[in-house]
């Protein structure tokens, strides 16, 4: 999502800085400023956050599964806490965080890590938008569509969203910072529609 969101924000006329790990520089969107640093260590990139009005956190373990419970804490949660510290230290006006819909019947460790990150955001005093998709349909992640009838039986907060809806939601969040904390659930994500 990071590259696609960066491209959309650039298209809308925003200046974008992308935090990438060493060796991943080619993944940054053309036209963005690339910061090579460790997302688990706010000191490695904190100075680069100064002057930014919005910080969008998109770091997380690829292809989450129950077998990755330890990584949810060591990567997802640790990177979120580092990002909150960097944003607060740089007096960033708005923090955007991709969490997960909860409560939910599966992926307990993943949800717990994301909920703890949400608490860190609240405790920081930052103005923030917390986006809570359940499952994002995108390239290589189409299999849930086969279970469409099952998903229609679940509460609306546990519905599927398309990656285009997520990008539109995140771009809109970056452009419309709240005062305090704003939570965006699946029905609202879907309402944003696809990026044109």
Image (cartoon, rainbow, N blue to C red):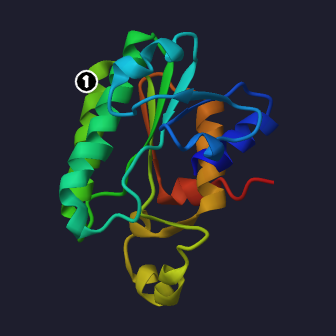
At x 76% / y 35%, what residue is drawn?
A: 10
- Report x, y in % for residue 190: 59, 60
Residue 157 is left or right of residue 145, and the answer is left
Q: Which part of the image, by quadrant, shows the C terminus?
A: bottom right
Quarter-of-image position of residue 117: top left
Q: Nearer the viewer, residue 190 or 141?
A: 141
At x 39% / y 49%, what residue is drawn?
A: 60
- Report x, y in % for residue 22: 49, 37
- Relative vertical location of residue 149 with respect to residue 86 in this rendering, above or below: below
Residue 104 is left or right of residue 47, and the answer is left
Q: How many marks?
A: 1
At x 26% / y 52%, what residue is drawn?
A: 72
Element marked by disc 1: helix
Residue 27 visible in the shown view: yes
At x 51% / y 89%, what residue is drawn?
A: 146
- Relative vertical location of residue 2 with respect to residue 187 in this rendering, above or below: above
Residue 14 is left or right of residue 140, and the answer is right
Question: Are there few (<14), some (14-19), or many (20+) residues within 10 Å of tag 1?
Answer: few
- Report x, y in % for residue 174: 60, 32
Residue 126 visible in the shown view: no
Quarter-of-image position of residue 76: top left
- Relative vertical location of residue 17 with respect to residue 195 in this rendering, above or below: above
Residue tagged by mark 1?
123
Quarter-of-image position of residue 153: bottom left
- Relative vertical location of residue 45 with respect to residue 139 in this rendering, above or below: above
């Amino acid at each position: 999502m990071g590259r696609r969101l960066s491209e959309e924000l650039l298209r809308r006329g925003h200046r974008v800085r992308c935090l990438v790990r060493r060796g991943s520089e080619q993944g940054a969107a053309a036209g963005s400023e690339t910061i090579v640093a460790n997302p688990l260590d706010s000191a490695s990139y904190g100075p680069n956050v100064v002057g930014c009005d919005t910080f969008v956190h998109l770091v997380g373990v690829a292809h989450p599964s129950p077998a990755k419970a330890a990584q949810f804490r060591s990567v997802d949660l640790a990177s979120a806490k580092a990002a909150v510290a960097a944003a607060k230290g740089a007096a960033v006006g708005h923090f955007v965080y991709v969490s997960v819909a909860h409560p939910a019947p599966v992926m307990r460790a993943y949800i717990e890590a994301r909920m703890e990150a949400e608490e860190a955001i609240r405790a920081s005093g930052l103005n923030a938008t917390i986006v809570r998709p359940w499952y994002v349909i995108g390239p290589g992640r189409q299999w849930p569509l086969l279970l469409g009838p099952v998903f229609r039986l679940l509460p609306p907060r546990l519905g599927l969203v398309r990656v285009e809806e997520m990008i539109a939601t995140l771009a809109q969040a970056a452009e419309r910072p709240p005062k305090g904390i704003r939570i965006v659930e699946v029905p609202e994500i879907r309402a944003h529609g696809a990026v044109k």
